[in-house]
Image: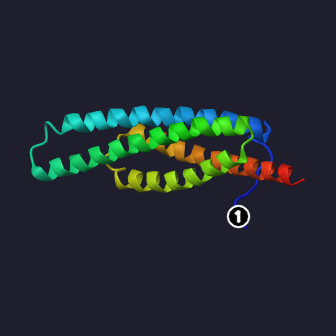
Amino acid sequence: MGLPVLETCCFVFDLKTGNIIMGGLNAALSFTLVVSLIVEAASVGAAADVVLGPEEAAALAGLYAMSVILVFMFLAKLCADVIFIYGVVAERAGIIKAYCIMWIVFFLLAMFTFFINITSYTAWTITVALFNILFNVYAILLSRSYYKQLNMREEV
């Protein structure tokens, strides 16, 4: 069965234009998440100075480590988003396929680390992360559809 293949983006744009728009928006969201998680890591680091017990200090150290890991993951995702936009403009199917594979790996890692620490994050960080996840699901459907379209064009 598999994932659905889309014909247009938002029922308005063709797949190439839609992927460029979604890639740009995805890069902007990744940047927003990087900034949000940097602020979160800084606030957790500042809270570590106030902690009294060793158990609380250990929990904050784990949260700080996960926040820093997520910052680097989303920074890598931001770079991949920019490369993806180039791949769509240049119509490079290999870059688009690599982006889809990278996205699946990134999605699994981000979901794992996000749901482990969801109780410790602020409402703003949770909202931005959930919006980013939903946005990425649609973006991956668009990129896969464009990849399929490029492969059909090359076979003919």
Up-down: is 31 above or below 80?
Answer: above
Indicate the quadrant where residue 23 lies: top right
Query: Mark 1: few, some, or many residues within 10 Å (few <14, many ≥20)?
Result: few
Q: In this rendering, would 147 be left or right of 46?
A: right
Residue 137 is situated, as x and y percent measured from the top left of the image, at 61, 50
96 to 108, vertically: above or below: above
In the visual, does 86 lie left or right of 107? right
In the image, residue 122 lies at what x, y percent?
Answer: 35, 40
Q: Where residue 73 sits in the image (x, y, percent)? A: 44, 44
Q: Is residue 2 left or right of residue 132?
A: right
* Residue pictured at 66% horizontal, 51% vertical: 97
Is residue 25 in view? yes
- What residue is disc 1 on? 2
Q: Residue at x 16, y 47 (%)?
A: 57
What residue appears at the point 9 percent right and 44 percent down from the top-left corner? 52
Q: Amino acid at mark 1?
A: Gly
Is 36 placed left or right of 21 in the picture?
left
Q: Quadrant of the N terminus?
A: bottom right
Q: Residue at left 53%, top 47%?
A: 133
State how the image is colored: rainbow
Percent across and percent down for residue 7 are 80, 47
Q: Nearer the viewer, residue 66 or 85?
A: 85
Pick out the residue farthest to the right: 156
| Label 1 element class | loop
> In the rendered picture of this protein, how many numbered marks are placed on residues?
1
Can residue 22 be seen from the camera position used here? no
